[in-house]
Every structure is written in C-alpha cells, then in structure tokens.
C-alpha cells in the first residue's frame, strides 16, 4: 500500500494511504466556490447541472454520476462510500432547502442525481413529476 506524508491541522506529520490523501483533498472543496446558482426551479437546472459537472470533474468524482467517466481510483470500499457521500453532499449543497427536503431520502449519489434530473431537467418540473408519480401510483 502506498503511503504519503500528510500535514495535520495540529502541525504533526502523519503517514496515510494515498487513497485517503486524495479523498481528503477532494473533501476540502467548498461547494459554493463552484456552485454560485442553487437549483430552485426548472429554469436554473441547466446552470446548476453545468456547475456541478465542473465540480465533480475537477474533484475526479464525475464517474459517480456519469458512467462515461472514471470513478476515483480507489480500491477500498470504505473510501468509495466516502466519495459517494461527499458527492451527494455536494448535490445537497447545490439545491435550495425545499428541494433538499425532497431528495434527502435517496441512498446513493446516482439516485439523487437522477431524481433531480427527473424533477427539474428539460421538459420536466416538480408539478409534472408529481402528477406522473400520482398517475403511476394510481395504475399500480
């Protein structure tokens, strides 16, 4: 296992696996530096999406939401789960409080990303989504 020297906040030098160091680097991102427009309705979905894709790509996490891209290069399931939680937290930070309440119960980043796209992406909207869900429930 490759190790790298890391400076802790207390000024003590520690050794940590490179996977952990890369995750720590990614987790220090300030979402508001990348996402200046929070999703609040279908009219600003494309702006939020573009900002989030830049953030995810910059932090090498775009593969978590888009299979066309590579996942972070990690072997540890624990670190993969941390990346998923980090990416999901970034999405939560990029939407307004009302939308956040609607998406908090989804398990994975992929689930959250897809439901946001379904609800607010092109030709959708919260009203259309809710009517479709009600109609689907009535047929079952």
Image: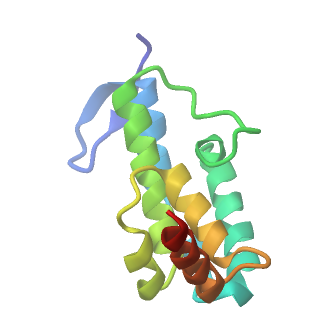
Residue at the (43%, 52%) spot, across then down: 86
Q: Residue, x 72% and y 74% (percent of image)?
A: 121
Above or below: residue 3 compared with residue 22: above
Q: Quadrant of the N terminus?
A: top left
**Residue placed at 48% from the left, 85% from the top?**
96
Residue at 60 percent of width and 48 percent of height: 59
In the rendered view, does 28 fall on the left or right side of 114?
left
Residue 101: give x, y in percent of width and height.
37, 78
Residue 93 in the figure: left or right of residue 117: left
Answer whether residue 34 is visible to the viewer in this image: no
Q: Is residue 40 left or right of residue 68?
A: left
Residue 80 coordinates in the image, percent (x, y): 44, 34
Q: Is residue 73 above or below residue 28?
A: above
**The residue positioned farthest toward the top in the image shown:** 1
Q: Is residue 128 above or below residue 2?
A: below
Q: Compare residues 120 and 73 and report the one nearer the observer.
A: 120
């Amino acid at each position: 296992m490759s190790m790298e020297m890391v400076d802790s906040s207390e000024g003590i030098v520690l050794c940590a696996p490179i996977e952990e160091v890369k995750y720590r680097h990614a987790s220090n991102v300030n979402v508001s530096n990348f996402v200046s427009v929070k999703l609040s309705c279908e009219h600003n979905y494309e702006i939020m999406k573009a900002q989030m894709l830049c953030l995810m790509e910059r932090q090498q996490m775009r593969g978590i939401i888009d299979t066309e891209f590579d996942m972070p290069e990690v072997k540890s399931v624990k670190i993969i789960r941390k990346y998923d939680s980090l990416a999901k937290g970034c999405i939560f930070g990029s939407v307004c409080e009302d939308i956040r309440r609607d998406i908090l119960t989804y398990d994975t980043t992929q689930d959250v990303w897809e439901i946001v796209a379904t609800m607010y992406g092109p030709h959708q909207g919260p009203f259309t989504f809710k009517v479709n869900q009600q109609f689907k429930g009535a047929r079952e």
